[in-house]
Image (cartoon, grey):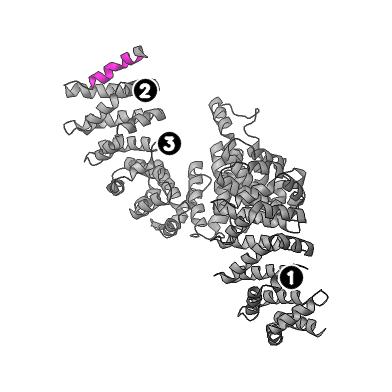
Amino acid sequence: LQEVTASSRHYVDRLFDLDPQKVLQGVIDMKNAVIGNNKQKANLIVLGAVPRLLYLLQQETSSTELRTECAVVLGSLAMGTENNVKSLLDCHIIPALLQGLLSPDLKFIEACLRCLRTIFISPVTPEDLLYADATVISHLMALLSRSRYTQEYICQIFSHCCKGPDHQTILFNHGAVQNIAHLLVSTSYKVRMQALKCFSVLAFENPQVSMTLVNVLVDGELLPQIFVKMLQRDKPIEMQLTSAKCLTSMCRAGAIRTDDSCIVLKTLPCLVRMCSKERLLEERVEGAETLAYLIETDVELQRIASITDHLIVMLADYFKYPSSVSAITDIKRLDHDLKHAHELRQAAFKLYASLGANDEDIRKKIIETENMMDRIVNGLSESSIKVRLAAVRCLHSLSRSVQQLRTSFQDHAVWKPLMKVLQNAPNEILVVASSTLCNLLLEFSPSKEPILESGAIELLCSLTQSENLALRVNGIWALMNMAFQAEQKIKSDILRGLSTEQLFQLLSDSDVNVLMKTLGLLRNLLSTRPHIDHIMSTHGKQIMQAVTLILEGEHNIEVKEQTLCILANIADGTTAKELIMTNDDILQKIKYYMSHSNAKLQLAAMFCISNLIWNEEEGSQERQDKLRDMGIVDILHKLSQSSDPNLCDKAKTALQQYLA
């Protein structure tokens, strides 16, 4: 190392010469020495060239030519490894270069911008450095008109540093749309391309930007029309893909209708083309991911995509690539693709998930694609978290099909790897995996039994305690599905696993979804007489407390209706009835809801009364008398004259019990 650095030392020594001309020649020689030579770049950084170059770049006394050459060398050093960029950042290169942009000299400005561009596109550079000083963005916007190089570099900086809604808003408020739009018709391909990339990141998941773009005119043409022209088959692939991304974002934001011809006849077919074998790996990945996003929430687009160019079969190739027989002669390319093949798999899973989100026939086609279920099962245990998440998403999408739950899911024992995924996954995977489990626990699904045996109750009970709302909802939802028409032992296990404390916690959850699913669980637990009596004999006091709590609270109609239905189930028990009959507070509440302004609540309250006064059951006479004394019969008479046929019928049936 010493010999190598010694031979590089003279380059650095010359930067300290007293003769400015020699310094300039030294910088030029250094520039020629480092081009394409990573070793030389590293040596010069180690020897301390960077602080000296930055000093010369910032000195007022340096000639413009010297300052420009310094910026060029720094840009060349930044082109090396990520460590080089880190060293440059440590020397505070960004403020120095941004300061340089205030110079009147265009060549120097371009050199500073080129170097900034190289630094900002490196993954080690924090984007926020661009936004630290509020004046920088407006100055960059002003520089856009200076030359085609300033346009290319500034657009590239913007598109790399625009991460998330905060950055989008800053750029939007500084007039990015107006300043960049006309660059889409520049004579320079590079400028057009970088401007297009800017719009693709500005519009992503951003309704404000998307709604603005729809109405922007450039040379008398609307932006969407310009994007459509850039989608055409004769344009470079990069351009087709990026304009498809712009139109996709605008469509998802509601700025363009999903049935607009520019989506159905242009954007969607273009993205399907990107999925073909002929395209490069990264094009296939981006094409599939963008298409998955475009069609994710629209059934009609899902149907159209599923029958375009045999897409479902075409995606199966994503799992076979690259194989040992790939016709890749470029060894570097093969090496790259082998390292990135997992990205293809996750993109295919994502797109399958979107395709199968709603339509039963499409799901069937996906599952019938060769080895599909095996591929998903393998995907669930891959080392890449992205692949695992996408595989779970795909499984979740397919698990919405009753037909598939009964067949393919059973044949491949999908629940096994799914339970494994649930053991210690990060939240984003847990949310989708637990949603899938909810579907596998529906009563018609044959997977229900084995899942129970593998310790699911404990797992789901722990999910209901999660800080994450979606996980709490899914945990309780899955337990609700599990309790539906289940045997008594399972119901007891659920109650034991949850604990009364946790049940109350869930019933007082601030989220109405959690509350509704918890009530659904209670209702499923309290079904069939022996079960009702058994559970009420062990947990009656707590359950009655919970019911009172909710009927007294500030809750919506659905919540109260569900709670009254639980009471009606309790009233259907043989011994459980007594818990209602001996609780005057609850009886008064039932009476109150019989005369409520909402018919749903009235009907639910009537179910409670009917179950309490039913004739064939022991003690019905005493119950009827007690309820008559409370004025229930008078209310029934009134309701039997109701204009609502349901209420009227129910009241008449109840009154017959008194006459029998």
**Residue marked by disc 2:** 42
Q: Residues within 10 Å of mark 1 (few under 14, many from 20)?
A: many
Q: Specify whether 615 is left or right of 468.
A: right
Q: Magenta stretch containing residue 638, yes or no? A: no
Instruction: Evaluate whether residue 109 shows in this view.
Output: yes
**Residue marked by disc 1:** 577
Task: Give the residue drawn at x 63%, y 53%.
Answer: 475
Task: Give the residue drawn at x 79%, y 81%.
Answer: 657
State the residue in front, 171 or 409: 409
* Residue 255 vertical placement versus 310 (above, below): below
Determine the CA span between mark 3 and mark 2. Answer: 19 Å
Q: Residues within 10 Å of mark 2 (few under 14, many from 20)?
A: some
Question: Mark 3 or mark 1: which comes first in sequence?
Answer: 3
Tell me the kind of residue under disc 3.
Pro
**SS at mark 3 in the image:** loop
**Residue marked by disc 3:** 123
* Residue 382 vertical placement versus 354 (above, below): above
Q: Which residues are magenta?
A: 4-15
